[in-house]
Image: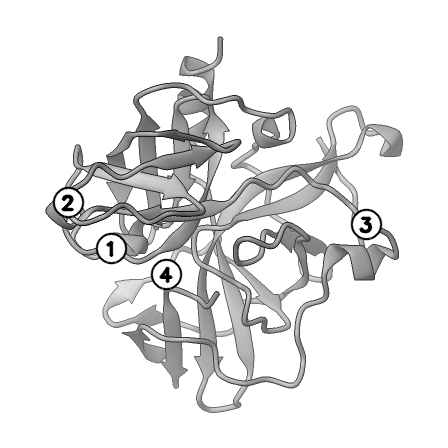
Amino acid sequence: MMKISASLRPSLRLFVVAGWGLFSMGCAAPSHVYAPRASDYFGKPLDFGFVAGQVLGPPKSGDSEICPGFPVAPHAVVTAAHCFKTPIVGANAGFGFAPVPLPGTVARINCRDVWMAGRLQEHIPIDPQGGDFALIQLYEGCAVSEWDRYVDPTLRPKPGEIVLVAPAFPATDPLVFRVVERPNWKEIRGINLPNDIVVVQPSSPDFVSGSPAKMMVSPTGKAEDARWYTFGLACASVTDTRTGEEYQVIMPLPQHITEIIAADTP
């Protein structure tokens, strides 16, 4: 496919010091430059089909953050692995805007305003090969739009290119970021970062872990056939304490996501 260049709070915040850093939970630090909305950047309202809602686990499944997530197939919802502090594969997990399940109840998934139950099926933490990927399997299938199905884990935007990231719920207008060269970060708290992470700027308080990230490509090579494909998910906000620069990190989706989608496609 040909790439077409278009010139909440983070659940995970990283502080990088001289190539080393620490994981720290918290809100983004104040900044004077924020990522624009797609409607402002392109000069008109745009609907890129993002569906993102809260992801959480009920008390009996261990601690969890409230993060966005997004469907890639009728029975498959994706979010960031670090949203589950104490992951238990097979435990009930939820995806939706509201209401948050009461203690002891089964978590629910809001897909097109229909609440359904699901469970955490796969949990891959960050390592040199990738990660920060969690898969929630729905017990019942939900309606998946054409936009949701535009997924390609092999895509990697280059510095200078534009990517879109779904904002903090319940907003629907995507945020626009520009890809930058990856700074010289070696590892964070002993965890080696994958070489193919995508680093973007500017900062944004609405950049939330687990949101889908898209770039524009054309499967035919023709501009009129260009679509916004999901290639990764929002992972973390990063502050380089040496320079004060703030960045956002996007983690590419694992290659086997295509097998998950194919196996769950009617």
> Residue 10 occupies which quadrant of the picture?
bottom left
| Tag 1: amino acid | Ser
| Tag 2: amino acid | Ser
SS type, badge 1: loop
Cβ–Cβ under 8 Å for marks 2 and 1: yes
Mark 1 neighbour density, 10 Å: few (under 14) some (14–19) many (20 or more): some
SS type, badge 2: helix
Q: Which residue is mark 2?
A: 61
76 lies above or below 110: above
| Residues at marks 4 and 1, CA–CA distance in whole angstroms | 22 Å
Cβ–Cβ under 8 Å for marks 4 and 3: no
Q: Which residue reaches farthest top?
A: 266
Image coordinates for residue 40, horizontal then vertical, percent = 81, 61
Image coordinates for residue 179, horizontal then vertical, percent = 65, 61
| Residues at marks 4 and 2, CA–CA distance in whole angstroms | 27 Å
Q: Which residue is mark 3?
A: 45
Whichever of labels 4 and 1 marks the residue nearer the N terminus, that label is: 1
Cβ–Cβ under 8 Å for marks 4 and 2: no
Whichever of labels 4 and 2 marks the residue nearer the N terminus, that label is: 2
Q: Which residue is mark 1?
A: 64
